[in-house]
Image (cartoon, rainbow, N blue to C red):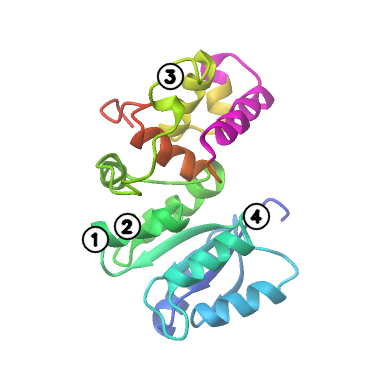
């Protein structure tokens, strides 16, 4: 199936990795390209693979090359690949660090299979998936707190009214088609506004755009996500 979500798994624990593959293989929408034993193995297989994955699930703590360093390399060499961080420790420092280097979602290893499947699908469709807890961590301004604030933070004319509307709906995790329906515009027009937002905020992807919007208080996290 051409519309399958292509997935790669990376974890040094064989039983856990095989368990992930068994769970995800049940989903008809998923195609597991390969699995890797550590970050070094992951990077080697990625560079040799003719077909790049849509999503990578990677453990953070692995020998040879850990998930954090692997995420940095993937973000640089394969910017279109979306990375979901897996860890046994759902802690603020880990989450903040992974988001800051390019992860677009975060899963605790004790998450349910249902949540894992949902997270993969959300990431594939929307470019990121942050639950309310992660969004609050972002709102606390822990990512790059010394970073110079850009013009948009104090100049309300920097974004058009429509761009702000699109941005708010992106942050509320709506798909392109859902945004188009809500604003009575075409999906192509939504994509145009989204590309303008990425350029204006100098964000590399949708996840970065969401982080920017929340930290610069362009969107209100208190509204329902």
Mark in the foreground, 4 or 3 = 3
- Name the element at disc 1: loop
Residue at the disc numbered 1: 91
Label 4, residues with CA under 10 Å away: few <14, some 14-19, many ≥20 = few
Instruction: Indicate yes or no whether the magenta region holds residue 195.
Output: yes
Q: Report the residue marked by disc 2.
A: 95
Horizontally, is 127 left or right of 88 in the view?
A: right
Residue 4 got which mark?
4
Mark found first going from the N terminus, 4 or 2: 4
Labels 2 and 3: the sequence-earlier one: 2
Q: Quadrant of residue 30?
A: bottom right
**Marks 4 and 1, Cα distance to the nearest angstrom?**
32 Å
Residue situated in front as seen by the camera: 159 or 15: 159
- Alpha carbon separation for disc pair 2 and 3: 30 Å
Question: Magenta span covers which residues?
Answer: 181-202
Sequence-earlier tag: 4 or 3: 4
- Cα–Cα gap, marks 4 and 2: 28 Å
Q: Residue at x 51, y 20 (%)?
A: 159
The residue located at (43%, 16%) in the rendering is 156
The nearer-to-camera label among 4 and 2 is 2
Q: Residues within 10 Å of mark 2 (few under 14, many from 20)?
A: many
């Amino acid at each position: 199936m051409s519309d399958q979500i292509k997935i790669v798994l990376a974890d040094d624990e064989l039983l856990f990795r095989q368990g992930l593959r068994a769970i995800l293989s049940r989903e008809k929408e998923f195609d597991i390209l390969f699995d890797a034993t550590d970050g070094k193995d992951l990077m080697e297989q990625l560079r040799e693979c003719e077909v790049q994955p849509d999503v990578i699930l990677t453990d953070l703590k692995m020998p040879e090359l850990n998930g954090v360093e692997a995420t940095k390399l993937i973000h640089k060499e394969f910017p279109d690949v979306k990375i979901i961080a897996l860890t046994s420790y759902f802690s603020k420092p880990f989450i903040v660090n992974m988001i800051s280097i390019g992860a677009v979602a975060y899963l605790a290893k004790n998450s349910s299979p249902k949540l894992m499947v949902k997270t993969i699908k959300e990431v594939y469709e929307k470019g990121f998936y942050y639950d309310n807890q992660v969004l609050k961590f972002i709102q606390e301004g822990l990512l790059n707190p010394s970073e110079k604030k850009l013009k948009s933070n104090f100049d309300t004319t920097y974004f058009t009214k429509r761009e702000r509307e699109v941005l708010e709906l992106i942050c509320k995790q709506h798909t392109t088609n859902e945004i188009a329906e809500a604003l009575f515009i075409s999906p192509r027009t939504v994509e145009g506004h989204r590309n303008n937002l990425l350029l204006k905020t100098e964000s590399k992807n949708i996840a970065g755009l969401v982080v920017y919007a929340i930290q610069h208080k362009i969107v209100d996290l208190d509204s329902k996500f």
